[in-house]
Image (spheres, helix red, strand yellow):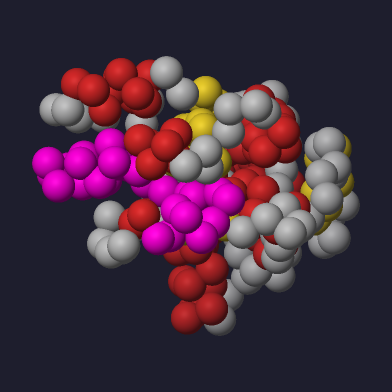
Amino acid sequence: MKIENHNSQLTIEMPKRTALDREDFLVNARNKAAVEFIDNFYKEPIKRGILIGPKGCGKTHLVNVLCKSLEGINWSFLSSENRNIYNIFNANDLIIIEDINNFNSKQKENFLFHSINLSKELSKALLLTSSLKVSKLNFKTLDLVSRLEAMNTAFIEEPDDTLMEALIIKFFNDRQLLVKPNTVNFLMQRIDRSYLGVSEIIELIDKVSLSQKKSVSIKLIKTLID
C-alpha cells in the first residue's frame, strides 16, 4: 500500500491489502501474523482463536474483514448482555466476542466459559478479541483460563517506526489534512508510540486546527504537546 501526502509527496511503501470496508488496513511485520491468522481462521479444522492487540490497533477492523469474506456463512457478535446464548450459537456458524479483557466479574467469566463450551458442543467457530494476553487477564475461573490458553492466538504488536509514520500520514490523509514531512518527523519524536497515541493526537490536532481555522504546522502542534 502506498501512503502519500499529496501536499509534499511524502511517500511510504507498504504491502497492499484489499480493503473490505471503509479504510485500508496497513500491514507490516508488527501485524502480519494477525492478518494471516484472520485470513486462515475459517479454513482451520478447529475454528477457535483469540486475536490479541493493544487498543486502537485494528482488531475490530480485521474481524469485520473476516466476516465480510464469509459468503453464505452466518455470523454474529455476542456480548455478555445477550440472552438466549444457545439460540444465537445454534443459528450461526461463527460467533465473535470482543474485548474479553473487559470481563471483570464472575458473571462475565461464566458467560465466556459457557460460550467456549457451546462452541465445542455445537461445533461452531468462535473468535475472541482482547487487548491483553491471556496470562494478563486475571480471570479467577481456572477452567476458563485453561480453555483460553489452549486456543490459537495471534498478536498485533505496537507499531515500529515504519508503521508509525505510515499511520500518522494515513490518519492525516483520512481527515484531508495536508502536512509537511518535517511536521510528521516532529510528531514522530514526541508522541506516544502506540496505535491509540497516534489516533488520539491526530484527532486532537484535527479538532484544534478546525476550531482555530489554522493549517497543521509544527507551531500549532507545539501548543498541544510541548
The reply, left or right, for residue 130 in relation to residue 185 is left
Viewer can see residue 16: yes
Residue 114 counted in the magenta span: yes
Picture layout, residue 181 above or below residue 49: below
Tell me what residue is drawn at x 65 percent, y 68 percent. Answer: 175
Main SS category, magenta section: helix
Q: Residue at x 67, y 38 (%)?
A: 42
> Relative to residue 130, is residue 5 depicted above or below?
below
The magenta stretch is: 87-115
Q: Position of residue 158 (x, y in %)?
A: 52, 31
Among the 4 quarters of the image, the one containing residue 23: bottom right
Q: Position of residue 139 (x, y in %)?
A: 19, 29
Magenta run includes residue 206: no
Q: Position of residue 185 (x, y in %)?
A: 64, 40
Q: Is residue 194 visible?
A: no
In the rendered image of this protein, does residue 64 appear above or below residue 126?
Answer: below
